[in-house]
Structures are given as structure tokens and as C-alpha cells.
């Protein structure tokens, strides 16, 4: 198959250096440097960043003069600087758009894939509305390649008023028109707007089809007898209240996702106002949700989904049930609610293994919510909103209950794209469509710290260890590679090299955790650690250390954690993560661990240790490729024997 590749979008203007607007300004000093001349220097260097000495060389001035001139541009806000430890400072234009001529877009319409080199913010923001970022390549800032794929679900969920606007968006990023691709997009769009649920003036739910034929053929064929009560017209039918979820699921499976325009219950009112100003993208998430009445906020860890969810609770304004995967997260949710809103603490209840307190806003664990004997939780109040934190943790019993609660607003939160949750159809039909931002733009805007990820290949400590591995098989082999004793030395070295950073060390096996914790004289938190002890250790980890703030605190700098630390626990000052073992885990686990360090402040470093010459090498690469797809850069280093 020859791919129908498009032309280069704009390289022809690549050599088109901006005009030098240089009628010399009599008042300006010799070290004045226009932004255009800085661009020229970059063009000449053929790199998106340059050091002061490179600029000096290109412009024929001294390094000191170039440094002063660049400092002036930085002061004016035109240029940013990046201080790379052990490397010279580099400068780059704040407005990357000025280098837009370097963007290159190639479409593969048959595969519905789009490859973009050095995309501008505009292109990325546009593409993320109707395509998924599936891979990134290259490591230099500004020179990375991005691979997007347009799937039917992406078109179904695209935030446009009509197909024309969607096709316009598609055309605005592609180098030329691709008739077949546009046709396919229109067709998918049409499919997602053929069936609609709405609330009749008399209160019951109606399924409306765009044509008699659709009602007669598609709906009749795919729906069960008890889904619909009675026809109302050739294109409308009265839906059995209990069957709303089933109707949505059946038509989704048939390739006709249903638009849901029903009036939903808002629940008994609850007094709550947000006290934190939302960031622009958060405000957009909340607006979109309130408009659609259901949806899933998808953003990297630390991107402010919880805060946006609190704004949503205030927006809906009714009693809310929040479901979370663990008790620790329940406690954390309560604190965030109190921190970011005016809610009366007496209105917030916790419902889990430790306490069962139903209040206007109640936070419960999935485990309890899924138990039959706690069924009443769902019926005990007029919940207007049910919020599902970490949606990929929703269990089958909770889904089946959710199916009964289709008349409430439903909000999911996820750091994992819905397409990777393993239950995409359930999430889409029972909770809602994804609402999200392009991860990269959040990294770039500085709202979330992009982690620096490095895979470090650690040699075996000695021949004996290597031979033992070679002689073992199966699980034992995996364990030996995981517990390679040379890793302890490597962890010590990494912690010493970043003494000022709070560090989390992740392990897979309890024995390994104990051994590392002993060697580092640090506490180890595993599933066996009682909840109150976990909470206390996490609190101490969050606290300032006595050695750094001069107070008599009981802060901790290092925590060794097993899978319990994998997600959701907010450890805002974890700036360094070492993944010591756990390379047999899922792709999701890899990105969650890295995610633990993605926080708005501080630097974020993730080291993944893999034993050289073992299956861990491949596991590490596979897990980290997953992060690469999200736009995170991954480096690899061989540790010397
Ligand atoms: N609009 C905002 N203004 C100021 N700080 C914010 C805002 N939104 C979020 N934050 C802060 O950023 C941090 C991360 O926010 P939040 O916990 O909502 O992220 P999250 O996406 O839910 O993270 P996770 O996936 O880890 O649960 C928190 O410390 C929070 O207080």
C-alpha cells in the first residue's frame, strides 16, 4: 500500500528568516538584541535553543554582550532560559509560535493517522480535540515527532456543534484535504447524533431516532423487549426508566452512541462554594460537564482534577456521593474539599471500613460501595452527583449500581486515558464521555511538572548472582532480577546525588521492600501496614524535615512503598521516585509511579532500575514507552560495573 502522504505543511518557508526590523534605534545601547535577530541565530544554529556563546558567534559579538542582550530579552518576557545542571544555560523564544514554519504535518488517511514534527501549541490543541496522541519520538525540545490517531470514539466525543465545524478543525491542521478521511469523520459524527434520550414534559424518558428506519431497524434489532415500554411515534419510544443504561450500552455497541439530553436530578441542595480560582482549562472542563451533565475528566496526575471536581460539586449544587479506591484517598478528598471550598466540615461524611457516616457530601470506597449489605448507601440520600475517582478502579458491582443511577449527574476522574482503562464501553456509557486537555500543553504551561524519566540499567553484583538468574526460571527468575542486590547501592547513590529531594522508592516484593528499607534506614509502607500508621508516615513525609527547616519536626525524606503508593496519594513534595522493582507490572503502573512526582512545583525525577541482561530491560522499555506516548521524555543510562 502506498500511503497517501501529504505535502510538507510549511517547510518551504523554513529558510525565510524574519526581516531584521533594524533601523538602528539611536537610543538603544550596543547590546540591544531584537527578538528577530535571536530567531536568526537559532535558524543559523538549526536548533530551537541556543547558548549565549552560540548567539554571540552567530551575531558576531562578544559572549558577555550576548549574555546581557539575552538577559534583556528575558526581562521583556520574549525569551525564556533553562538552567541545565552541569550544562550551559540555554535560551529559547517564549513564543514558540514564531518558529511555526518548522512544523511539518503528514497524514496517513487510510490508517487515520497524523504525524506532526515540531507541532505548534495550536496544532496540538486542535488535534487533541478529535484524535489521540499515541506516540512521541525524539528527545530534544521543539524537535519531537507526534503520532496521532483518529478513532471513532474520538470523533463521537469531539467537542463541536456540528460536523462542519469538526471538519473545519481537521482541515485547519492537515496540509491538504483528504476527501475519504473527511467522509469517514462525517459518517462517524452522524452516527453519534442519530439517537437521543430526553425527558418528556410528563417526566418520562424518551428515545428519539433521527429516522423511522433507524427506529424500526437499528433500535428494534439491538434493544430488548423490556427496554422500551411503548412507541410514541414512528421515531420516538418511551424508555423503561430502569433500562436507560442498557439502551445506551446496546446502541453504543451497535456503533450508535446515544446523546443524553435528559433532565437529571440535582439532589437536595448543599451549601458549597469554591474558594480557589480555577485555571482556564479547569473552568472549561467544568463548563463542559455542566453542559453535558456527565463526563470523565482525563488529565495527568496533579493536573487539578480533584479541584475541578469540587467546582463541579458546587456547580451541580446538590448532595454528592464520591467513590474512591482507598481509605487514604477518602481522607485526602475530605481535606481537599475543606481546603478548596466553603463546605461546612459537618456536611462531609466518610464511609469506609473505619467509619460509616452519611452526610450531604459522602466519600466512600469502591469496596464498601460494591457490597450488598451497604446498598442503602446509594439510596440513603437524594444524590444529585456521583463522582468516581480513578475510574479504572470502578468495580463490576459498582457499575451495576451505577446503571441504576442513570438519573444522577455522573463525573469520573482519571489520569489514564479512557481508552486504556480496560472498560472503555462501561466508562463511556455508564459514566460519560472523556473531557480532557492535551497533557503536553499542561506540561508546557507549567501547571504540571513534566517528569524526567531515566531507565538505569544496573549490572549484576557478581558472577554468582548472574549465574543464579541464568539457572532459575519463571517467577523465581523475575524475582531474582527484581531483587538484584546491586540495586541497593544504586539507590544509595541516587539518593545521595539528590540529597535535598524527598524520595519515594517503589518496590514490588515485600522482602525486597524490607531489605531496601533496612539498608536505607527508612520506613516501608506495604498493604500490611495498618491504615493509621500509613497515614502517619505519609503525614511525616509531607512535613518539612527538621534538617532542612531548622525546626524540631519529625519529617521523613525517604519512604519505601509497595503498590499501595501507586496512585492517588497526594505527596506534593515527592520530587524523586526510584522504581526499584515492579517491572512486571502494567503499563498503567509505570505511568502512575512516574505520576507520583508530577506536581506543580519542584523538579520531578524518576529513575527506573532494571537489571542489565534480564527481562527487566524489556519491561522497563515497554512501560516507559507508554509514558513516551503521553509526551514524556525518557532517557536511558548504563550503570558502570
Ligand atoms: N486552580 C488551582 N489553583 C491552585 N492550585 C490548584 C488548582 N488546581 C489544583 N491545584 C493544586 O494542584 C495540586 C494537584 O491538584 P489535584 O489534587 O486537584 O490534582 P489531581 O489531578 O486530582 O491529582 P491526582 O491525579 O494525583 O489525584 C493540589 O495541590 C491542588 O491544590
Image: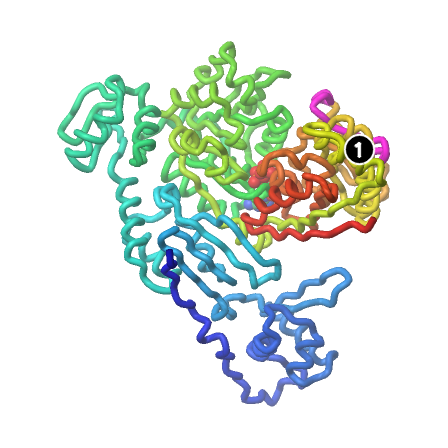
Mark 1, Cα crowd under 10 Å, few <14 / some 14-19 / many 20+, is some
Report ligand 1 position as a quadrant: top right
Q: Position of residue 580 (x, y in %)?
A: 74, 38
In the orientation shown, which residue stands out farthest toward the front? Answer: 471
Q: Residue at x 31, y 33 (%)?
A: 260
Query: In this rendering, does residue 259 appear at all?
Result: no
Q: Position of residue 515 (x, y in %)?
A: 82, 30
- On the picture, is 471 further left or further right than 143? right
Question: Which span of residues is magenta-colored?
Answer: 518-532
In which quadrant of the rendered view does residue 256 lie? Answer: top left
Between 626 and 302, the one nearer to me in the picture: 626
Query: In this rendering, does residue 138 appear at all?
Result: yes
- On the picture, is 227 further left or further right than 623? left
- On the picture, is 64 further left or further right than 272? right
Mark 1, secondary structure of its residue: helix
Residue 237 sits above or below residue 87 on the image? above
Disc count in the image? 1
Residue 547 sits above or below residue 203 on the image? below
Q: Residue at x 50, y 23 (%)?
A: 395
| 528 part of magenta stretch | yes
Q: Which residue is mark 1?
A: 468
Amino acid at each position: 500500500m502506498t500511503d497517501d502522504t501529504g505535502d510538507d505543511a510549511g517547510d518551504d518557508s523554513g529558510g525565510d528568516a524574519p526581516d531584521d526590523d533594524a533601523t538602528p534605534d539611536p537610543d538603544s545601547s550596543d547590546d540591544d538584541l531584537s527578538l528577530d535577530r535571536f530567531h536568526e541565530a537559532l535558524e543559523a544554529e538549526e536548533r530551537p535553543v541556543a547558548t549565549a556563546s552560540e548567539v554571540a558567534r552567530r551575531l558576531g559579538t562578544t559572549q558577555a554582550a550576548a549574555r546581557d542582550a539575552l538577559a534583556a530579552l528575558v526581562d521583556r518576557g520574549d525569551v525564556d532560559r533553562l538552567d541545565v545542571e552541569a550544562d550551559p544555560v540555554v535560551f529559547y523564544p517564549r513564543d514558540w509560535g514564531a518558529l511555526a514554519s518548522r512544523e511539518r504535518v503528514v497524514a496517513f488517511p487510510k490508517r487515520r493517522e497524523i504525524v506532526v514534527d515540531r507541532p505548534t501549541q495550536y496544532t496540538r490543541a486542535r488535534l487533541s480535540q478529535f484524535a489521540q496522541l499515541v506516540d512521541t519520538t525524539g528527545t530534544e525540545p521543539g524537535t519531537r515527532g507526534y503520532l496521532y490517531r483518529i478513532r471513532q470514539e474520538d470523533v463521537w466525543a469531539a467537542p463541536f456543534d456540528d460536523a462542519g465545524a469538526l471538519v473545519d478543525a481537521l482541515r485547519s491542521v492537515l496540509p491538504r484535504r483528504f476527501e475519504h478521511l473527511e467522509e469517514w469523520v462525517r459518517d462517524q459524527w452522524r452516527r453519534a447524533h442519530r439517537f437521543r434520550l430526553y425527558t418528556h414534559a410528563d417526566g418520562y424518558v424518551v428515545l428519539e431516532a433521527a429516522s423511522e428506519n433507524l427506529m424500526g431497524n437499528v433500535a428494534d434489532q439491538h434493544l430488548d423487549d423490556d427496554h422500551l415500554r411503548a412507541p410514541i411515534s414512528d421515531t420516538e419510544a418511551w424508555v423503561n426508566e430502569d433500562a436507560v443504561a442498557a439502551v445506551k450500552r446496546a446502541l453504543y455497541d451497535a456503533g450508535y452512541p446515544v446523546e443524553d439530553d435528559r433532565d437529571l436530578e440535582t439532589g437536595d441542595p448543599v451549601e458549597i462554594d469554591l474558594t480557589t480560582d480555577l485555571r482556564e482549562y479547569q473552568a472549561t472542563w467544568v463548563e463542559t460537564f455542566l453542559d453535558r451533565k456527565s463526563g470523565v475528566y482525563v488529565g495527568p496526575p496533579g493536573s487539578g482534577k480533584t479541584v475541578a471536581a469540587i467546582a463541579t460539586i458546587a456547580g451541580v449544587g446538590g448532595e454528592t456521593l464520591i467513590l474512591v479506591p482507598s481509605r487514604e484517598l477518602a481522607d485526602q478528598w475530605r481535606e481537599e474539599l475543606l481546603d478548596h471550598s466553603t463546605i461546612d466540615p459537618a456536611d462531609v461524611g466518610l464511609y469506609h471500613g473505619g467509619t460509616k457516616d452519611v452526610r450531604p457530601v459522602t466519600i466512600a470506597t469502591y469496596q464498601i460501595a460494591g457490597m450488598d449489605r451497604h446498598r442503602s448507601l446509594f439510596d440513603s440520600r437524594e444524590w444529585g452527583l456521583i463522582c468516581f475517582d480513578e475510574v479504572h478502579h470502578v468495580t463490576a458491582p459498582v457499575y451495576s449500581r451505577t446503571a441504576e443511577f442513570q438519573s444522577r449527574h455522573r463525573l469520573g476522574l482519571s489520569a489514564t486515558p479512557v481508552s486504556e482503562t480496560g472498560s472503555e464501553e462501561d466508562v463511556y456509557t455508564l459514566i460519560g464521555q472523556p473531557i480532557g486537555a492535551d497533557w503536553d500543553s499542561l506540561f508546557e504551561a507549567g501547571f504540571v511538572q513534566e517528569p524526567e524519566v531515566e531507565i538505569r540499567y544496573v549490572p549484576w553484583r557478581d558472577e554468582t548472582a548472574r549465574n543464579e538468574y541464568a539457572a532459575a526460571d519463571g517467577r523465581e527468575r523475575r524475582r531474582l532480577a527484581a531483587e538484584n542486590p546491586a540495586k541497593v547501592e544504586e539507590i544509595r547513590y541516587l539518593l545521595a546525588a539528590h540529597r535535598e529531594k524527598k524520595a519515594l522508592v517503589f518496590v514490588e516484593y515485600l522482602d525486597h521492600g524490607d531489605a531496601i528499607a533496612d539498608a536505607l534506614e527508612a520506613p516501608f509502607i506495604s498493604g500490611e501496614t495498618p491504615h493509621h500508621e500509613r497515614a502517619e508516615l505519609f503525614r511525616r513525609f509531607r512535613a518539612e524535615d527538621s534538617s532542612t527547616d531548622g525546626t524540631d519536626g519529625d519529617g521523613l525524606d525517604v519512604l519505601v512503598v509497595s503498590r499501595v503508593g501507586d496512585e492517588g496519594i497526594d505527596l506534593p513534595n515527592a520530587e524523586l521516585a526510584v522504581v526499584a522493582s515492579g517491572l512486571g507490572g502494567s503499563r498503567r503502573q509505570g505511568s502512575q509511579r512516574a505520576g507520583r512526582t508530577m506536581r506543580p512545583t519542584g523538579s520531578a525525577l524518576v529513575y527506573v532500575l532494571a537489571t542489565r541482561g534480564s527481562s527487566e530491560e524489556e519491561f522497563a522499555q515497554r512501560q516507559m514507552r507508554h509514558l513516551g506516548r503521553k509526551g514524556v521524555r525518557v532517557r536511558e543510562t548504563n550503570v558502570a560495573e
